[in-house]
């Protein structure tokens, strides 16, 4: 692997992880297409879809660690929310991942498209007053949170994603969790969700370790920087960036399906 390819992979990991830390998503919805399409644009060898998914899985694992570490102080992490939703999404993603072998590739793409469309619609629902709630007074229905995380886990397990792009709008719109707490807690939940995916990719030999190592270094540097930026940016702006990102993902998926 030449120096140009190494720099390209590092920049993809850095940009994706910065956005990941700032918005509370694992970042695979950004880095997956970047890894797939950008290296060939510069004349480098293209990764296969399996290689990209393996690199993305291990990179999300480290990006979310970096983001959570940056948010560990200030009351941003809701431990009860993380415990209920983290446990449920882990179980759901395991079942979804195991059952995905029974589905065709076309069916998996449709599931992903439906999830992204639901998430995009939810992000444009008005969220009045949620950021006026003090962190120590946040309340939510624990069993509803667990049920919804389980459903997200099923879908995420089927398509091989961590599911944060769906978790965030659910936490904002349904559970009424303040934006910054949603971002911090969703990173922790996504970290839990990514454990299964990472272990699965490693044990089945789907990871190209050298580019993955470059992405991990980029993630550990960029995710905390993104998280620090996310603490300072106006919550309305964060919501708009998230909405646009998720909507763009939904459009891209459905254009591929149709």
Image (cartoon, grey):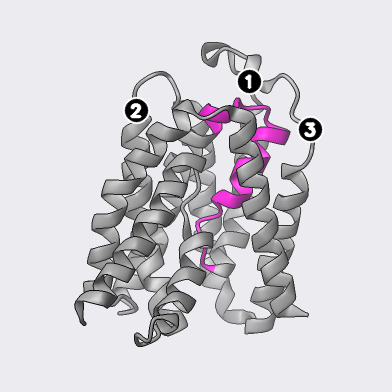
Q: Confirm whether residue 66 shows in the render.
A: yes
Label of residue 211 in the image = none
- In the picture, measured across the screen, residue 196 lies left or right of residue 121, that is left
How far separated are the C-alphas under marks 1 and 3?
12 Å
Q: Earlier in the sequence, mark 2 or mark 1?
A: 2
How far separated are the C-alphas under marks 3 and 2?
28 Å
Query: Could you classify mark 1 by the number of other residues whose Cα lies within 10 Å: few (under 14), some (14-19), or many (20 or more)?
Result: some
- Residue identifier under label 2: 72
Question: Is residue 84 shown above or below 164?
Answer: above
Residue 221 location (% of width, % of height): 27, 47
Residue 93 location (% of width, % of height): 52, 59
Residue at image location 35% in from the left, 87% down from the top: 45
Label of residue 126 in the image = 3
Residue at image location 37% in from the left, 37% down from the top: 68
How far separated are the C-alphas under marks 2 and 1?
19 Å
In the rendered image, the quadrant that contains the C terminus is bottom right
Q: Main secondary structure of the magenta part?
A: helix
Residue 172 inside the magenta-drawn segment: yes
Q: Are marks 1 and 3 in contact (CB under 8 Å)?
A: no
- Residue at disc 2, secondary structure: loop
- Residue identifier under label 1: 131
Residue at image location 20% in from the left, 81% down from the top: 2
In the rendered image, the quadrant that contains the N terminus is bottom left
Question: Is residue 166 shown above or below 128?
Answer: below
Residue range corresponding to the magenta coloring: 160-182
Query: Could you classify mark 3 by the number of other residues whose Cα lies within 10 Å: few (under 14), some (14-19), or many (20 or more)?
Result: few
Q: Nearer the viewer, residue 199 or 165?
A: 165
Q: Quadrant of residue 215?
A: bottom left
- Residue at disc 3, secondary structure: loop
Q: Nearer the viewer, residue 193 or 58?
A: 58
Residue at image location 58% in from the left, 68% down from the top: 158
């Amino acid at each position: 692997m030449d120096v140009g390819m190494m720099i390209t992979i590092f920049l993809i990991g850095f940009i994706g992880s910065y956005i990941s830390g700032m918005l509370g998503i694992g970042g695979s919805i950004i880095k997956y297409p970047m890894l797939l399409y950008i290296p060939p644009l510069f004349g480098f060898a293209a990764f296969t879809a399996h290689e990209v998914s393996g690199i993305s899985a291990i990179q999300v694992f480290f990006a979310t660690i970096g983001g959570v570490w940056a948010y560990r102080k200030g009351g941003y992490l809701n431990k009860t929310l993380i415990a209920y939703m983290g446990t449920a999404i882990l179980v759901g993603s395991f079942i979804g991942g195991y059952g995905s072998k029974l589905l065709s590739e076309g069916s998996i793409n449709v599931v992903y498209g439906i999830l992204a469309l639901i998430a995009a619609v939810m992000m444009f629902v008005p969220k009045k007053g949620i950021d006026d709630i003090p962190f120590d007074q946040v309340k939510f229905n624990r069993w509803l949170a667990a049920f919804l995380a389980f459903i997200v886990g099923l879908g995420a397990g089927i398509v091989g994603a961590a599911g944060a792009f769906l978790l965030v709008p659910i936490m904002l719109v349904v559970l009424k969790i303040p934006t910054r707490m949603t971002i911090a807690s969703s990173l922790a939940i996504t970290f839990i969700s990514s454990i299964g995916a990472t272990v699965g990719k490693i044990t089945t030999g789907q990871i190209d370790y050298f580019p993955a190592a470059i992405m991990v270094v980029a993630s550990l540097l960029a995710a905390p920087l993104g998280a620090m930026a996310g603490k300072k940016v106006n919550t309305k702006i964060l919501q708009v960036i998230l909405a646009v990102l998720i909507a763009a993902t939904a459009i891209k998926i459905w254009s591929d399906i149709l």
